Image: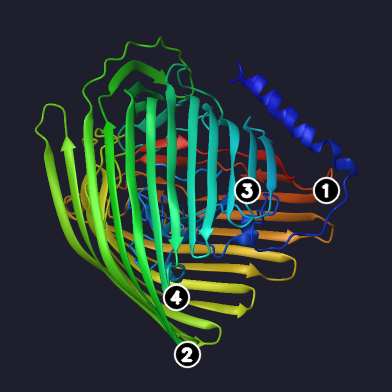
């Protein structure tokens, strides 16, 4: 740790200048290939490597209409639909960027490769795979919001193709839109071991420690008033109110092919999120004159841990143009959570935009609650493929779910569920470049935890039955361009805050929509990734009938659009890129009495590829939120925080 923020930034700036110093004498190398990230970081380009416009993360950049927390209007992570290299993973902490090569959101036709499909899509993390080529990458970055970072990544063969290790370390100095700051140390390590031609084992470990994380206030107006206009970049929290904690993930992946036509895959994961200090600051009940009650919610140390994994055996058959696979799978998880016992301090009235420093109180914490969830799922699936004709897939699984809850002063409560879930899909190649598909999935899923602004904050919610129907097409007008379209309908119970502030089920949510993706090369120099979704979400139930709940769910826009372009200019080593993102207005309160307005943002940037002291290097410059659009993020019904403004960023990546 360095003594102050200025010293940390000075060191990071010196690192950046040291890497950049010889650049004036460098010569430009040939352009790297568009596909595949290569052994280092200089070849990473999310627009060049994304397969569709639904959601992709490569390295430091993310694009697409969906994120892990919002797929077709639902959280794929809350639903338990995370995968690591295709294998089931109960996420408490995600793989850090030091061991993660990519993240992709799989929906519609892109999810057909998963034998056990689930509603709400799949978040698939791809881990790094250390290989036979040694590599070392360094990245230094900074921006006009006072963010700065230094990252190192490596891959080192120890015994040719048999054994290699890789990973990295990063130090990040973060500044957020509301003026809050934090520092993070990120470490990751992975190995790939092939003791025999038929066996590969990949252990991995990653950890992210967050320190000195100050917390600025969220804003909750009284009644059904719209959010106040709050200043960006100004810290209005308390120096003593913050967050300290760590996220850790480790595990092992294994693949064995013991005989012709047989494969066995194993993924075993241990994921944990540990908090030493956790604070939520809220300016509540804001009146028309701009005053509100300054509340600080502080939790004692807590933890959430999960052990999860999947064992899968596959038997493959092939005869002529016909091939098929029979897959047997066993998935399980054991999640344990210690939470609650928070203390709430009311510091009285404060005006929006004014910082008032309060003395740190003596917190008095209460007894904490414990949740434990054990779930196991056994299933069998069939996937058949007929060359140039189509494919069919279906699976059946039985899920056993048990949850134990221990609340202070109450007897232990236990709930159990057992559900037979199934999925099926069919895809037909109706023309050499055109395929159509249809699918159905039913699942038993988690519904996440109550948000920070709820009276039951952090409480694990019950398991729910869900179902999804979808259909669509995939058309390739050229060998390098692909258009994917589809329609879908997903039904789940609807959770939000009620009038007492309790986050609970208020009805049933049906999301029906149309989604489109266009990805690929329009010309030799221009590549595009475009995604769009038109959503028709509807809430039904008793709350809607009596007028306490609106017919539209909180936070979901009816339309969302994301377009990305990457142009390799005639200037050697220079490429330019742009992004345009739009979302329509969305309900901000459960009653639908307040809507956040539509928002459109634009970003531009460029890359300069050159040789730095004989090493491949990329200087990346970008300007995000080009027109300084003002808007809000939602913490939940009626609670807001401001989004980032215009920001100029620069980074330098060198592969040694």
The disc, 2 or 3, on the residue closer to the chain's N-terminal end is 3
Camera-side residue of 280 and 636: 280
The quarter of the image holding the C terminus is top right
Direction from residue 590 to residue 47 in the image, left or right: right
Question: Where does label 3 land, which residue?
Answer: 158
Q: Residue furthest front?
A: 196
Question: Where does label 4 land, which residue?
Answer: 260
- For label 1, the SS is strand
Q: At 43% from the left edge and 36% from the top edge, which residue is drawn?
A: 247
Cα–Cα gap, marks 2 and 3: 41 Å
Marker disc for residue 611 = 1
Question: Where does label 2 land, which residue?
Answer: 320
Q: Is residue 427 visible?
A: no
Direction from residue 414 to residue 315 in the image, left or right: right
Q: Residue furthest bottom?
A: 320
Cα–Cα gap, marks 4 and 1: 46 Å
Asked if labels 1 and 4 touch by Cβ distance under 8 angstroms, the answer is: no
Q: Is residue 195 visible?
A: yes
For residue 263, above or below residue 176: below
- For label 3, the SS is loop
């Amino acid at each position: 740790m360095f003594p102050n923020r200025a010293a940390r930034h000075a060191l990071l700036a010196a690192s950046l200048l040291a890497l950049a110093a010889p650049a004036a004498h460098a010569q430009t190398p040939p352009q790297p290939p568009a596909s595949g990230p290569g052994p280092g970081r200089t070849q990473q380009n999310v627009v060049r490597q994304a397969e569709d416009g639904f959601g992709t993360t490569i390295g430091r950049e993310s694009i697409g209409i969906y994120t892990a927390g919002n797929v077709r209007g639902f959280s794929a992570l809350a639903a338990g639909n995370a995968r690591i290299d295709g294998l089931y993973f109960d996420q408490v902490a995600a793989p850090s960027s030091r061991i993660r090569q990519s993240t992709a959101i799989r929906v519609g036709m892109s999810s057909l490769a998963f034998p056990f499909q689930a509603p709400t899509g799949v978040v698939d993390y791809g881990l790094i795979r250390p290989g036979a080529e040694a590599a070392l990458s360094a990245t230094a970055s900074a921006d006009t919001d006072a963010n700065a970072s230094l990252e190192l990544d490596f891959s080192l063969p120890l015994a040719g193709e048999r054994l290699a290790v890789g990973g990295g370390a990063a130090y990040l100095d973060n500044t957020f839109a509301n003026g809050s700051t934090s520092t993070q140390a990120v470490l990751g390590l992975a190995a790939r071991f092939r003791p025999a031609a038929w066996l590969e084992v990949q252990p991995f470990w990653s950890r992210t420690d967050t320190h000195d994380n100050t917390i600025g206030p969220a804003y909750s107006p009284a009644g059904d008033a719209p959010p106040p206009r709050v200043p960006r970049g100004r810290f209005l929290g308390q120096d003593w109110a913050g967050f300290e904690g760590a996220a850790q993930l480790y595990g092992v992946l294994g693949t064995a092919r013991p005989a012709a036509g047989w494969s066995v895959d194993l993924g075993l994961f241990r994921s944990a999120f540990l908090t030493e200090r956790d604070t939520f600051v809220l300016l509540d009940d804001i009146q028309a004159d701009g005053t509100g009650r300054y509340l600080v919610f502080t939790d004692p140390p807590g933890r959430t841990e999960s052990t999860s994994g999947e064992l899968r055996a596959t038997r493959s058959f092939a005869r002529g143009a016909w091939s098929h696979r029979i897959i047997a799978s066993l998935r399980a998880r054991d999640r344990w959570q210690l939470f609650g016992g928070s203390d709430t301090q009311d510091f009285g009235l404060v005006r929006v935009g004014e910082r008032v420093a309060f003395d740190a109180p003596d917190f008095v914490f209460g007894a904490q609650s414990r949740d434990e969830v054990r779930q196991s799922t056994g299933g069998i699936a069939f996937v058949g493929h007929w060359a140039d004709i189509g494919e069919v897939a279906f699976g059946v699984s039985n899920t056993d779910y048990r949850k134990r809850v221990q609340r202070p002063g109450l007897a232990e409560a236990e709930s159990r569920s057992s559900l037979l879930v199934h999925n099926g899909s069919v895809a037909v190649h109706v023309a050499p470049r055109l395929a159509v598909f249809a699918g159905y999935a039913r699942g038993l899923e988690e519904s996440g935890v109550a948000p920070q602004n709820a009276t039951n904050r952090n409480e694990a919610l019950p398991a729910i039955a869900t179902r999804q129907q979808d259909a669509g097409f995939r058309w390739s007008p050229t060998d390098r361009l692909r258009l994917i379209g589809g329609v879908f309908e997903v039904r789940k119970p609807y959770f939000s805050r009620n009038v007492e502030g309790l986050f609970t089920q208020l009805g049933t949510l049906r999301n029906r929509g149309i989604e489109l993706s266009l990805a690929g090369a329009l010309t030799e120099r221009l590549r595009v990734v475009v995604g769009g979704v038109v959503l028709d979400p509807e809430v039904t139930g008793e709350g809607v009938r009596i007028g306490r709940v609106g017919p539209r769910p909180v936070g979901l826009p009816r339309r969302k659009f994301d377009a990305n372009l990457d142009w390799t200019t005639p200037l050697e080593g220079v490429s330019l890129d742009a992004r345009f993102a739009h979302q329509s207005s969305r309900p901000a309160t459960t009653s639908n009495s307040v809507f956040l307005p539509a928002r459109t943002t634009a970003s531009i940037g460029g890359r300069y590829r050159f040789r730095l002291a004989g090493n491949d290097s990329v200087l990346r410059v970008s300007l995000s939120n080009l027109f300084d659009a003002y808007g809000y993020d939602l913490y939940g019904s009626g609670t807001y925080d401001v989004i980032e403004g215009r920001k100029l960023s620069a980074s330098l990546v060198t592969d040694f």
